[in-house]
Image (tube, rainbow, N blue to C red):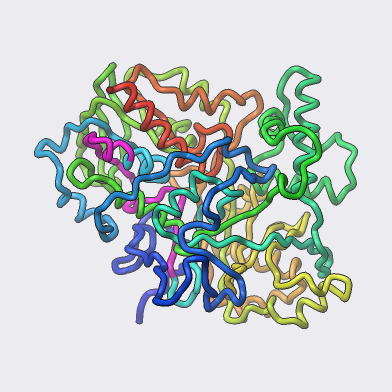
Amino acid sequence: MPRPVLSRQDPGNHSQPGSRAGTGGALPACRRRAGESRGGRTHPSLGQARYTRAGVRDACRCGRPPSRPGCGSARSPEFSTGNRAPRAALTAAHVEEQSMPADRKRVDVSVLGAGAAGLAAARDLSQAGLRVTVIEARPRIGGRILTRHDPRSPVPLELGAEFVHGEAPETLSVAQAAGLTVIELPATRELATAGHFSQLGDLWGDVQRMNKELARRVAKRGKDFPVSEYLESARLPPLRRKLLRGFVEGFYAARPERLSAKSLGEEAASDGGGEPSAGERDETQFRILNGGDALMQWLRDGLDPERAEVRLSTVAHAIRWKRGQVAVVCRGGDGAAGESTVHARAVVIALPAAVLKAGALGFEPALPAKQRALAGIETGHVLKIVLRFRHAFWENPEFLKERRGNSNADTGRLNFLHAPGAEIPTWWTSLPVRAPLLTGWVGGVTAETLLAEEPASRLERGLVALSDVMAVPRRELEENLDDWASHDWRADPFARGAYSYIGVGGSDAPRALGRPVEGTLFFAGEATDGEQIGTVAGALGSGRRAARELLRATS
């Protein structure tokens, strides 16, 4: 009997032999069958929804949602696809077999972290001819992208990053180069109130208007302030106030009393002045149908095997450095005794801000400027729970008709559902793919409270919340529940939280954190990208930026 991929509480730091969990085993690229058009075909679970291989559109325009900063005016440079055949997933056993110089302890560059930022940097550096050692604490690549593949589900289960927000060229260009399938999500969002579903309205427009008002208030005061002050003092209808607070806590995973008003105001400024049109206010979201781990595996497969290696289950805990020389002191991630040291000319540090802020990586000599920068960056916390049911009861036409009524009956299948005030206020289905999956999401203080409980208690609270939101008896939900999965990123010692946001007074912190030190220490990760902080696109872009800086400094 095969072991189910879904688990009651996903540990995230191990993988099962033979599975495509965590380590990102070789994934199909959804290649076309004979006679299929390149423009797209109908997926068996998609109904009439269309999807395309290797990207949604031929070129990425900067149609970004107001809730996330701009992607810049130009596309990011294309990744080289290389001409090597893809390899199988890298395991600890494979590491020792990689073709590397005889002196494995001395390389050109060490890269700390095999998440999106670290792999993007390592790929560019190894293809530029440098010898690279990637040091990863986990027994898998991917960082805060954690994908589980379940043969009973037509879509991968994403326990970490899931969506591409807007047409982010940094992410979509990689997916295109990797030949992955990117699907566009429907834009429909509904409001759940006392068992009644209604169309949510223009949430993105409300967010844009809030951000513009924050920019105006910051300019008037001449200094930053917490977003909570606006949410408490603004003259807003009660429902809109709840929705905006829920958005701040959910999308940014932030505590409003710590989130920088200036940072959100700068998002509004980056989108230009005036009232945005529907096209400019594009809340389009995408998923990678192959799974986020396929993106990470493609980056890893692009490392030059003659010049690069990835060391898994290896924790870097100290860096001793001087200009042009770095010694990275490591120990086994599984608690193995003894230390090893990797010597390099430079290092790219692509670890989560919360890990650096906690002092898990020591620097000799110390870096007080980086500590000051980290003080301006906060880490958000999220509870994300994926529930798989035996039957997708929300697709029953009678179920929807009872809750939508006649005035809202033609909205289509359920997509996103928002329930302001509920303990878990945001739920979504797997549309446009049809699967018996529901994902619940809550951020901010409520997430921190729930994460402090035992996994079984989180599941129970999730079912109670879903019962209230869907107006379905909790007992029925439990009887229909087949399995569930979640990952506690706050308790994960190699993440210590979900993703970053800018704290009050910290608008310059990402840039300061990302600034190189004496042409020897280079910093990457989503926390170093102020415009796309908290996103996979920000992580990818920062890794490539760090690689460019290093190549310039060492040329």
Position in image of residue 144 (x %, y %): 46, 49
142 inside magenta stretch: yes
Is the stretch drawn in magenta largely helix, strand or loop?
Answer: loop
Q: Is residue 371 left or right of residue 380?
A: left
Residue 126 location, x and y as percent?
Answer: 26, 39
Q: Is residue 103 above or below residue 39?
A: above
Magenta residues (range): 124-149
Q: Front-most of 379 and 304?
A: 304
Can you say whether 467 is above or below 317 in the image? below
Nearest the eye: 182 or 439? 182
Left or right: 395, with 381 as reference point:
right
Where, by quadrant of the figure, is residue 434 drawn? bottom right
In this rendering, the answer to whether 17 lies above or below 161 is below
Query: Which quadrant does the N terminus fall into?
Result: bottom left
Number of callouts in the render?
0
Q: Is residue 233 left or right of residue 163?
A: right
* Percent position of residue 157, x then y: 50, 64
Q: Is residue 466 magenta?
A: no
Compare residues 167 and 471 and report the one nearer the observer.
167
Relative horizontal placement of residue 7, taking residue 195 as reference (left or right): left
Task: Report the residue at 46% width, 67% height from top.
Answer: 7
Q: Is residue 410 above or below residue 501?
A: below
Question: Which picture quadrant has residue 285?
Answer: bottom right
Residue sitting at x 58%, y 76%? 389
Q: Residue at x 34, y 20 (%)?
A: 519
Q: Is residue 260 visible?
A: no
Q: Position of residue 500 (x, y in %)?
A: 55, 38
Res. 455 visible in picture? yes
The C terminus: image quadrant = top left
Find the residue positioned furthest to the left. Answer: 102
